[in-house]
Amino acid sequence: MPEPHSAPDPRGGTPRFRRPAPLLFEPSDSKEDSEQFFDLDTITDPRELLERSTELALAFRAAADRAVEFQAMAAAQLADPKRFDRLSDAAVAERGDWSEDYARKMIEFGRELLEDRGPQ
């Protein structure tokens, strides 16, 4: 699974953690705003544009990584042998739109995540 990315330290050396930008709204679906994306098109200063677009890229990466973790936990729960309505690896793969091999890996990853969380 992809690891969260740290922003490089501008002075060199070890990377420092950079908190992702909050995603407070989604882009509009209307035709008139079709070119707007989180108001990046309105930023004229290239330094500010780079900073804000980097923040958004990091936020999307972090959100995608977190969503994959939730997918894995759900896959593990659906394939749990203790469930009377347990799904096969193939059924989990179909629901996740994955290959069966990838579903098995996700189920295994999800089990590891659920073990780390402890009893709920």
Image (cartoon, helix red, strand yellow):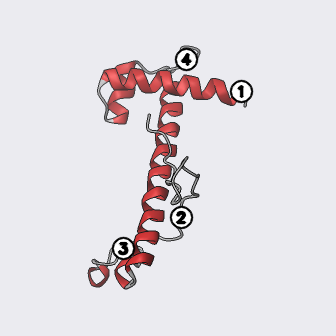
The kind of residue on which mark 3 rests is Phe
Mark pair 2, 1: CA separation? 30 Å
Q: Is residue 13 visible?
A: yes
User: The residue under label 2 is which amino acid type?
Assistant: Ala
Q: Type of residue at label 1?
A: Gly
* Residue type, numbered disc 4: Phe
Query: Which labelled disc corresponds to residue 118?
Result: 1
Q: Secondary structure at mark 4?
A: loop
Distance Cα–Cα, label 4 vs label 3: 46 Å
Given this view, does label 3 or label 2 mark the residue nearer the observer? Answer: 2
Residue 26 visible (yes or no) = no
Alpha carbon separation for disc pair 3 and 1:
40 Å
Vertical relation: 76 (above or below) 6: above
Query: In the picture provided, is 71 more to the left or to the right than 17?
Result: left
- Of badges 4 and 3, the one in the foreground is 3
Q: Nearer the viewer, residue 25 or 88?
A: 25
Give the alpha-carbon distance from disc 3 to disc 2, as whole Å. 14 Å
Residue 105: x %, y % from top left: 41, 23
Which residue is more in the foreground, 100 or 78?
A: 100
Q: Which residue was labeled with disc 2?
A: 21
- Which of marks 4 and 2 precedes in the sequence? 2
Q: Tell me which numbered mark, 3 or 1, is placed earlier along the sequence.
A: 3
Q: 101 above or below 51?
A: above
Where residue 3 sits in the image (x, y, percent)? 48, 39
Q: Are marks 2 and 1 in contact (CB under 8 Å)?
A: no
Residue at disc 3, secondary structure = loop
Q: Which residue is mark 3?
A: 37
Check disc 4 and report the residue beneath it. Answer: 84
